Image (cartoon, coloured by chain):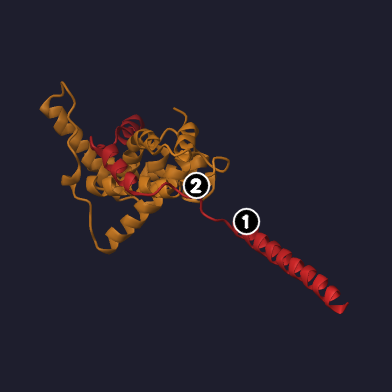
Chain colours: A red, B orange
């Protein structure tokens, strides 16, 4: 009985349609190439980058402002 | 062909390489969906949706965390359970007519009839099993998945899977024997 049951379960109850692969690929071809999804780590990296760029710009402007105030004072 | 090599080709923009993924997994996927007690048309829809979702989320797949088959069958399982839940809430029951006729060359009509009857009995018996036991059993008959992979897909321990499988097989045997009497 065990073997019969195993054979029955392995034999498969359904058939793969002949055109199944083509059908799936037709749908796949309508979809865009899979794009990597952003993880929390990626988001953190992006935030850190934005933060660093902002600090850099502030530093640059304060440097320019420093030079301007020093030259204006004379 | 090695699945990771195929996935690498897809990542490099070779869309047609996905055909190899479909060809490699369509048979086991239909086998699984059949053992889950789904009809031919529902199984076709779910199998197609499984491959489409796999395509969309291909970048989420991490080969260091699980085998591709485990990942793919997790998608299929979730879709199948959702479909079965929806069908049971609508009281849709798989009809025997939805089983395709398997005819092999050289088979006598009586053999074909006998085989189809056996398969219909098996299907009815499978349908009588609790859905979680049925899913574990359906997955266990896919050779590429070991018990640990089945447990991972089912979201429980290997021990729990062993218990479910034992219980499912025992119940299935009882149901089939009862039918034979």
Task: Tell me which chain the residue with mark 1 is part of.
Answer: A
**Label annotation for residue B59:** 2
State the residue in front, A73 or B169. A73
Q: Nearer the viewer, residue B5 or B27?
A: B5
Q: Are marks 1 and 2 on the same chain?
A: no
Return the x and y of residue A54 as percentages of the image width and height. Answer: 69, 66
Q: Nearer the viewer, residue B148 or A4?
A: B148
Mark 2 is surrounded, within 10 Å at the Cα level, by few (under 14), some (14 to 19) or many (20 or more) other residues, namely: some
Q: Is residue B25 visible?
A: yes
Query: Residue B58, how many percent across, how many down?
Result: 46, 46
Residue at image point 32% right, 56% down: B83
Q: Is residue A41 above or below residue B125?
A: below
Q: Position of residue B112 (x, y in %)?
A: 16, 30
Q: Residue at x 51, y 39 (%)?
A: B67
Label 1 residue SS: helix
Question: From the viewer's perspective, is residue A30 above or below residue A2?
Answer: below
Q: Which residue is mark 1?
A: A41
In the displayed structure image, the side of residue B180 where residue B173 appears, left or right: right
* Relative horizontal placement of residue A47, taking residue B81 as reference (left or right): right
Q: Residues within 10 Å of mark 1 (few under 14, many from 20)?
A: few
Q: Which residue ends up furthest to the right in the rendered image?
A: A74
Which residue reaches farthest left? B109
Q: Position of residue B23 (x, y in %)?
A: 34, 34
Mark 2 lies on a secondary structure that is: helix
Q: Quadrant of the C terminus of chain B?
A: top left
Name the chain under label 2: B
The residue under the point 62% across, 59% down is: A46
Identified at 34% across, 45% down, the residue is A28
- In the rendered image, the quadrant that contains the N terminus of chain B is top left
CA gap, disc 1 to disc 2? 15 Å
Residue that protrudes farthest toward the front in the picture: A74
Q: Is residue A14 visible?
A: no
């Amino acid at each position: 009985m065990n073997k019969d049951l195993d054979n029955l379960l392995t034999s498969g109850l359904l058939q793969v349609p002949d055109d199944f692969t083509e059908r799936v690929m037709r749908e796949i071809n309508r979809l865009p190439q899979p794009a990597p999804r952003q993880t929390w780590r990626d988001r953190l990296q992006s935030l850190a980058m934005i933060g660093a760029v902002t600090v850099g710009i502030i530093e640059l402007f304060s440097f320019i402002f420093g030079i301007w105030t020093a030259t204006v004072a004379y | 062909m090695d699945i990771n090599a195929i996935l690498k080709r897809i990542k490099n923009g070779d869309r047609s390489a996905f055909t190899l993924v479909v060809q490699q997994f369509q048979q086991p996927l239909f086998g699984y969906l059949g053992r889950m007690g789904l009809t031919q048309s529902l199984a076709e829809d779910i199998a197609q949706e499984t491959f489409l979702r796999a395509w969309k989320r291909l970048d989420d797949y991490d080969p260091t965390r699980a085998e591709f088959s485990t990942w793919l069958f997790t998608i299929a399982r979730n879709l199948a359970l959702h479909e079965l839940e929806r069908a049971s809430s609508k009281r849709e029951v798989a009809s025997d007519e939805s089983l395709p006729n398997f005819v092999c060359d050289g088979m006598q009509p009586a053999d074909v009839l006998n085989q189809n009857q056996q398969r219909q009995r098996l299907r009815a018996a499978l349908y009588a099993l609790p859905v979680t036991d049925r899913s574990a059993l359906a997955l266990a008959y896919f050779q590429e998945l070991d018990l640990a992979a089945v447990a991972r897909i089912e979201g429980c321990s290997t021990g729990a899977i062993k218990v479910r499988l034992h219980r499912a097989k025992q119940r299935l045997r009882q149901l089939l024997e009862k039918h034979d009497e």
